[in-house]
Amino acid sequence: MCRRDEAGLFFAPSKEPTAARLSREEAAKRVCARCPVMVECREHALLQPEPYGVWGGLTAAERRVVLARRRRREMELKKAARAANRIAQAG
């Protein structure tokens, strides 16, 4: 769907006013919501990571939050695995 829409919907022009940016991002997210490959698009943007635009229904700021949560979760899982290994070794 987004290939048929103009790129301006997904990427901010320079010095875009906040109200216009929010409106444009919401319109882009509505396009994303109808997309059959939204999840794949989002994962691509998170793996790259894409620093600009709306990808997979998320803005750049929203993607940064998702990435930070993933990093935190990975660190917590590694910490729990290390603790489990120590308990198993002491057992």
Image (cartoon, rainbow, N blue to C red):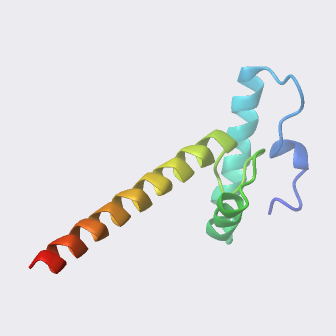
Foreground pick, 43 / 4: 43
Asked if residue 19 is positioned above or below residue 53 in the image, the reply reads above
Left or right, 5 with respect to 24, comes to right
Asked if residue 12 is positioned above or below residue 76 in the image, the reply reads above
Q: Residue furthest left?
A: 91
Q: Residue furthest front?
A: 90
Foreground pick, 48 / 24: 48
Left or right, 5 with respect to 43, comes to right
Asked if residue 82 is positioned above or below residue 63 in the image, the reply reads below
Locate residue 16: give its quadrant.
top right
Which residue is found at the position 67% from the left and 48% from the top? 29
Foreground pick, 56 / 78: 78
How many discs appear?
0
Q: Quadrant of the C terminus?
A: bottom left
Which residue is found at the position 18% from the left and 79% from the top? 89
Give the x, y percent position of residue 17: 79, 20
Left or right, 20 with respect to 84, comes to right
Locate residue 1: give its quadrant.
bottom right
Which residue is found at the position 41% from the left and 58% from the top? 75
Give the x, y percent position of residue 65: 54, 44
Foreground pick, 40 / 47: 47
Which residue is found at the position 46% from the left and 50% from the top? 69
Give the x, y percent position of residue 82: 29, 68
Left or right, 81 with respect to 7, comes to left
